[in-house]
Image (tube, helix red, strand yellow):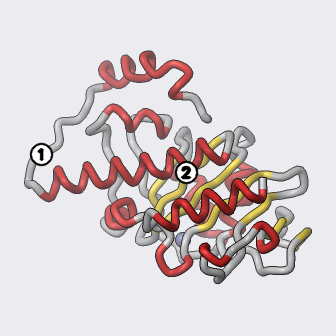
Amino acid sequence: MQAELIAAAQALDALGFMPSKSGNLSCRTERGCLITPAGLPYAETGPEDLVEVAPDGSVLGGHRRPSSEWRLHMAIYAARPEAGAVVHTHSPFATALSCARQPIPPFHYMIALAGGADIRCSAYATFGTAALAEATIAALEGRRAALLANHGAVAIGKSLAGAQTLAMEVENLARQYLALRAAGLPPVLLTEAELREVFAQFGDYGRLT
Ligand SMILES: [Zn+2]
């Protein structure tokens, strides 16, 4: 699990999803979660730098400070029993959209991967706070991904690979949606009936991975 977390963090960092040591990843453990440390460049982070935190934030293992967003991760694990991993990024296009506090509407069928007809944007709250954790849980209701207002994005998965893939798809959708808006073209949104067919077509693919 440790090596997989580091590899995922470094891969997302290489894509420009974690500017200035931002973003954080975690996997659920029996006692809490294993999370990336605070303030360490991902390129210099190794498995020994990961921190296991309890639901109350106390450190169960590791010699670093946990990511400042440990509350957000723990709140997601508490609210979403199916989540085995959480990926939080500051990926550029999703973050840009989050600064307009706008959701991603169903302009492309791949929106279904996030679990519903849209990807919501949370209410704004200061980073690292319980208020942000609460706002994120609300935005994730019935979804596997959300934008965090004036901040970034979050994706959950049964597995770390699933959460990582979804984080990349959220960024992809945000990029496509912003390109469409930048071109001055009004998006034609999928209807409820069209979305129902997409979910049927996805079948297992649409389930939490
Ligand atoms: Zn953040």
Q: Quadrant of residue 181?
A: bottom left
Residue drawn at the location 17% of the way across and 36% of the way down:
188
Quick one: which residue is furthest to the left in this view? 184
Q: Secondary structure at mark 1?
A: loop
Residue 41 % position (x, y): 60, 79
Q: Quadrant of residue 86?
A: bottom right
State the residue at coordinates (77%, 80%).
Answer: 65
Classify residue 102 as left or right of residue 27: left
Q: Looking at numbered disc 2 in the image, what kind of residue is underneath it?
A: Ala
Residue with the mark numbered 1: 186
User: From the viewer's perspective, is 100 left or right of 48?
Assistant: left
For label 2, count other residues whose C-alpha is less than 10 Å away and answer few (under 14), some (14-19) or many (20+).
many
- Mark 1 and mark 2 lie on one chain; the one further toward the N terminus is 2
Q: Is residue 8 above or below residue 169?
A: below
Q: What is the x, y in percent for residue 135?
A: 56, 61
Residue picked out by circle 2: 155
Q: Split into 4 quadrants, where in the image is the C terminus?
A: top right
Query: In this orientation, which residue lies closer to the viewer: 103 or 67?
Result: 67
Instruction: Report helix, strand or loop for mark 2.
Output: strand
Q: Is residue 138 visible?
A: yes
Marks 1 and 2 in Cβ contact (< 8 Å): no
- The residue at the point 59 percent across, 56 percent down is 87
User: Viewer-proximal residue, 29 or 40?
Assistant: 40
